[in-house]
Image (tube, rainbow, N blue to C red):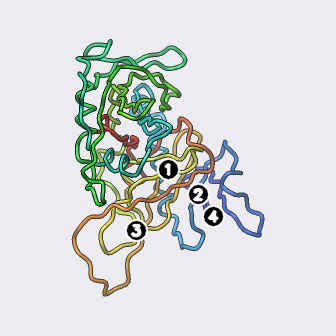
Amino acid sequence: MRSRAALVSSALLLGVSLTVVGCGADGVRTASDAPAGKDVLVTEDTGRPDNGAGARRAAEVVKAWTGSAAERAWRKGYRPLDQAEWLPPDAFRSEGDKVAFISGHLDLVTQLPASGSGGPEATVTWQDGSTVRRPLLTSRHIFDGLARNKSGCDGTDCNRRLRVTGVKAATRTLATSRGPASIPVWEFTIEGYAQPFAYPAVAPDQPPRGPQSDRPAPDIDGVSSAGDWNGLSSDGLVLNAGVSHGSCVNTLPGQVYETKDAVVLIGRVEQLPKGTICDADLRVTPVRFRLSRPLGTRTVLDAVTGDPMALMTPGGAAR
């Protein structure tokens, strides 16, 4: 996935040096060329006006977060930065298999292990040898999560089911906020697939509240909360998140304020024309947020709440 453009803008925000990136015939650097040591404001679209309110708020969020007790707590815990789901290379062999799996049509034809080798807790181990103990997610917990009807079946293969013929404990390596970590997983063998489907056997730490959480979230014109992010591109440059908004506004391309240690997601919205018929429902729209350089171990923050954002993972571990 590649950005069409990045916003060209200029500002000094709250005393923070802001490097603005963009594209065009004027020779301004693209987002991927931005220097790693500078704060950067990047937007997917150059054709929309920007009053700078989101960037000013993002600078406030970073200033409050840096060096706070919440930041210290965040960096000590287990925070996945990647989708914790490992599918076999040949998944899926057919559209029928895919529909059955997504719909939770799984039949267990083997015994589930009573527990993992770690007992009621399991160990996460980083490359530097540091560890943390987290509650163990049982194989029953994971299977029940996978077997729920996770989405409605709308096709010709709605009666197809998949047979789970084996379940065992194993380990996998996962990107986290503290670098790669070895975590315990449950591997589920599905009939017809040579390699297993794997899911974490350990739950992530809950995010701490940000240092500004005790204050009411500010009402910023044109800015909305990005909520929990739910995906990261393989090159680490594009985050996917859901922007919450009312029915009388449109979502705009995502904006990102970056420092060397943090990434602030700025959900942008604009009011629909006067006279538009709206309801009172709250909506969440998927939005892409493009970075100037790979996310790495930087913390993702929400511009509205100022809170750190945990990656929402699929499968039973996220339920």
Separation of marks 1 and 2 at Cα, in angstroms: 13 Å
| Residue where numbered disc 3 is placed | 221
Q: Secondary structure at mark 2?
A: strand
The residue at the point 69 percent across, 57 percent down is: 30
| Quadrant that contains the N terminus | bottom right
Separation of marks 3 and 1 at Cα, in angstroms: 23 Å
Asked whether the residues under the numbered discs 1 and 4 touch, taking CB atoms below 8 Å apart as contact, a structural biologist would say no
| In the rendered image, the vertical position of residue 313 relative to residue 138, given as above or below | below
Q: Secondary structure at mark 4?
A: loop
Callout 4: 10 Å neighbours few (<14), some, many (20+)? some
Question: Which residue is the extreme one toward the bottom?
Answer: 275
| Residue where numbered disc 1 is placed | 239
The residue at the point 46 percent across, 57 percent down is: 266
Separation of marks 1 and 4 at Cα, in angstroms: 16 Å
Label whose residue precedes the other's in the sequence (1 or 2): 2
| In the rendered image, the vertical position of residue 86 relative to residue 220, given as above or below | above
Q: Amino acid at mark 4?
A: Ala
Residue 37: quarter of image: top right
Separation of marks 2 and 4 at Cα, in angstroms: 9 Å
Q: Position of residue 73 (x, y in %)?
A: 39, 29
Q: Amino acid at mark 1?
A: Leu
| Residue where numbered disc 2 is placed | 42
Q: Secondary structure at mark 3?
A: loop
Closer to the camera: disc 2 or disc 4?
4
The residue at the point 50 percent across, 46 percent down is: 232
Q: Secondary structure at mark 1?
A: strand
Asked whether the residues under the numbered discs 2 and 4 touch, taking CB atoms below 8 Å apart as contact, a structural biologist would say no
